[in-house]
Amino acid sequence: NAGVTQTPKFQVLKTGQSMTLQCAQDMNHNSMYWYRQDPGMGLRLIYYSASEGTTDKGEVPNGYNVSRLNKREFSLRLESAAPSQTSVYFCASSPIRDEQYFGPGTRLTVT
Amino acid sequence: GQQLNQSPQSMFIQEGEDVSMNCTSSSIFNTWLWYKQDPGEGPVLLIALYKAGELTSNGRLTAQFGITRKDSFLNISASIPSDVGIYFCAGPRRDFQGAQKLVFGQGTRLTINP
């Protein structure tokens, strides 16, 4: 099992550009999550999907949209990137129990 | 948002020493999770605790679920260089739809002098 995979690993965008971060899990987990991690801020939840077909806002959803494409895939879209969105983005998935399993992250820089 | 209180925030130790860190909350959790994050990587789940009083080991790591359900402890015995990283505690909360979200501690940064 690959676990949780994320693409791309690194990305540089100019202000105003759009992009989609991809996440997939092969563990048949119901729930999936997107976090951002900034220095000194810890992990902050952007959006989550409790099950296929549902998505909900987390702590910091402004400037982002998500799509739960199917049970395996959960994408995060930045429609118009801003320098404040420079961060490391982590996707995670969770079975019915309480653990979450994280992907390797995408480092995004917006100039 | 809500956070767990994790201490210490950083530790500087010699290789071979034992390490202890803890996490406390003002409210009860039914599960405690401990993660480790290496530089440039995602958090990796080390230990999950599901029952008050539970003591669980994973190699040189031992974690305990406090009896009050408001705290948890992580110990690392005989530290080695690859133990360097940031350790996070986390506890799940369920929203009105039953969706699980994690509350995280601020992290303990472990540095080891060889």
Image: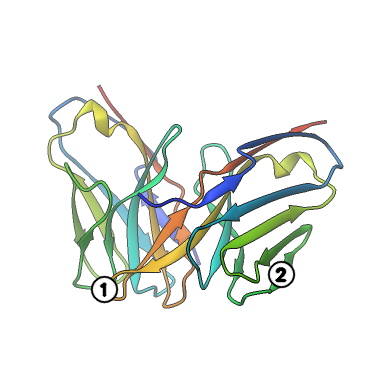
First in sequence: mark 1 vs mark 2? 2
Q: Residues within 10 Å of mark 2 (few under 14, many from 20)?
A: some
Q: Secondary structure at mark 2?
A: strand
Position of residue A22 relative to residue A27, above or below, is: above
Residue type indicated by callout 2: Thr
| Total numbered labels | 2
Q: CA distance from mark 1 to mark 2?
A: 31 Å
Of the numbered discs in the image, which one, if any, rests on residue B80? none
Seen from the viewer's position, the closer of residues A103 and B75 is B75
Are the residues under marks 1 and 2 on the same chain?
yes
Residue in the picture at 25% in, 55% down: A75
Residue A2 x/y as whole percent: 48, 62
Q: Residue at x 51, y 73 (%)?
A: B30
Q: Is residue A88 left or right of residue B12?
A: left
Crowding at dot 1, Cα within 10 Å, few <14 / some 14-19 / many 20+, comes out as few
* Amino acid type assigned to the residue bearing label 1 in the image: Phe
Q: Position of residue B86 (x, y in %)?
A: 59, 42
Query: Which residue is at 39% across, 52% downward?
Result: B2
Determine which of the numbered discs, if any, sits on residue B96 in the image.
1
Residue that numbered label 2 is attached to: B56
Left or right of A99: which side holds A67? left
Q: Position of residue A6 (x, y in %)?
A: 38, 51
Question: Is residue B20 visible in this depiction of the protein?
Answer: yes
Q: Position of residue A63 (x, y in %)?
A: 16, 41
Label 1: chain? B
User: Is residue B77 toward the left or the right of residue B66 in the image?
Assistant: right
Question: Is residue A111 depicted above or below A11 in this figure?
Answer: above
> The residue tagged with tag 1: helix, strand or loop?
loop
Foreground label between 1 and 2: 1
Q: Is residue A3 visible?
A: no
